[in-house]
Image (cartoon, rainbow, N blue to C red):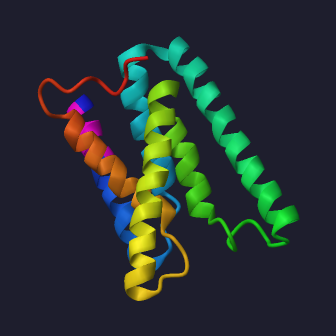
Amino acid sequence: MIVTTQIIVLLVLGLIAYQDVRERMVHWILFPALALAMGYLFSERIGIHQYALLVFANLLLVSSIISILYLYTKYLRGMEFLDVSFGLGDLLFFLAFALGFPTLTFLILFTSSILFSLSIFLGMKKINGEKNAPLAGLMSFYLIIVYMISFLPSTPSLYIH
C-alpha cells in the first residue's frame, strides 16, 4: 500500500505541476487527494498521535505565513489578497503540504521549495516575461524531485523527526 500511495503522490504532484504551469489553474480535487496521500504516508511511518501533533505545528506555521502575507498584501501594498497576489490553489497546496512531513522536514522542504520556485520564476520572467508565478506547480515539481531522491537506497527518511 505504501508504494501505491507513493505513486499516487507522484502522479498528483505531476498533475498539479503540469496544470499550474500550463494553465495557471489546478483542479481542486487534486489538493485533497494530495493531502490524503501525503498524510497517509506520514502517519503510517510515525503513528497517529505524533502525526496529529506535528501536523498541528505545521498548520500553525502555514497559518502564520498566510496571515503575514495577507496583512502585508492588504495593508502595506493595498491589494486584494486571494486570486490577485496569492492564488487559492497555492493556499490549498500549502495546506496539503503541511500534512505530509514532520515539522523540521516540513520547514526545510517548504523553505527550499519556495527558494527553488523563486529562482525558476525569475528565469521564466526573464525569458518570457511571466508576471505570475505558478507557485503550487513549481513547488510540486520540487517535491517530485525530493520524493524521487528519497526512493534511492541509503537516503535518509523524510519522516525522521
Q: Is 136 placed left or right of 67 in the picture?
A: left
**Residue 156: percent from left, percent from top:** 25, 23
Q: Is residue 145 visible?
A: yes
**Highlighted magenta segment, given as a residue range:** 3-9
Side of 145 relative to 117 (left or right)? left
Residue pictured at 65% horizontal, 65% vertical: 86
Q: Is residue 134 magenta?
A: no
- The structure residue drawn at horizontal position 37% and vertical position 63%, both measured from the top left corner, is 17
103, 12: nearer the viewer? 103
The image quarter containing residue 131 is bottom right
- Give the answer, above or below, for where 129 lies relative to 97: below
Image location (x, y in percent) of residue 35? 48, 42
Q: Is residue 137 visible?
A: no
Q: Is residue 122 above or below residue 35?
A: below
23 is higher (above) or lower (below) than 68: below
Query: Residue at the bottom extreme?
Result: 128
Instruction: Give the residue displayed 49% in from the left and 57% down from the top.
Output: 29
- Give how far across and how far down residue 111 sits, in percent: 50, 44
Q: Quadrant of the N terminus?
A: top left
Relative depth, front residue between 8 and 110: 110
Q: Main secondary structure of the magenta part?
A: helix
Q: Residue at x 43, y 49 (%)?
A: 113
Q: Is residue 9 left or right of residue 150?
A: right
Per the image, is 4 magenta?
A: yes
Q: Is residue 65 left or right of residue 12?
A: right
